[in-house]
Amino acid sequence: MAVLPILRWPDPRLTTVCTPVRGDVRALAADMLDTMYAAPGRGLAAPQVGALLRLFVMDVTWKEGIRTPQVFVNPEILWLSDTRATGPEGCLSLPGATTYVARATEARLRWTDLEGALHEETLSGFAAICAQHEYDHLDGILTLDHLSPADRAIAEGALL
Ligand code: ZN
């Protein structure tokens, strides 16, 4: 168990498409949860700690006092609702930048857990938005990539 360094934009590993998980990632997932809680954050994707694998962790309730750690191995987004909501999003790899991103308010995901069991669930509200944000990381997509060129320039200026 360890808190890992979190990569910051513009590290090129953050814009790399990650490869599927094949081996045992229990130790990595445990370290990622430690790192997420220490940051503190509510979601963390493997590429943010330099592991270019399709894996993310999230816990959307711990800041309200209830720990519900979740590990998503090789997640797929099966469906996104047409209903969108635009809200402020932070990212541990973009410290100091809050960007407004339009996201589906419901998302159906399929993923494997650390024991190899397959899960399928429709997430809603903050969990749906957080999962879409973390899933983007696995494809090398950051919140900056959702902005207009003008808004992106402003956001990048705040980061440099
Ligand atoms: Zn992020």
Image (cartoon, helix red, strand yellow):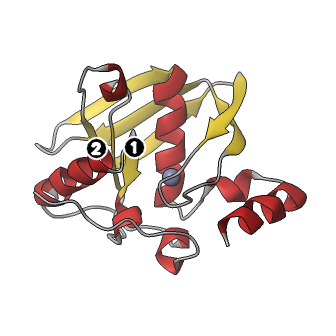
Amino acid found under the numbered disc labelled 2: Tyr
Name which residue lies at 51% across and 73% down.
Answer: 16
Image height of 73 relative to 107, above or below: below
Is 108 placed left or right of 114 in the picture?
right
Residue beneath disc 2: 37
Amino acid found under the numbered disc labelled 1: Gly
Q: CA distance from mark 1 to mark 2?
A: 6 Å
Q: Position of residue 114 (x, y in %)?
A: 15, 45
Residue beneath disc 1: 41
Q: Position of residue 29 (x, y in %)?
A: 20, 53
Name which residue lies at 38% across and 29% down.
Answer: 60
Quarter of the figure that contains the C terminus: bottom right
Tag 1: Cα neighbours inside 10 Å, few (<14), some, or many (≥20)? some
Image height of 76 relative to 6, above or below: above
Quarter of the figure that contains the N terminus: bottom left
Q: Do residues under tags 1 and 2 come within 8 Å of each other at their CB atoms? A: yes
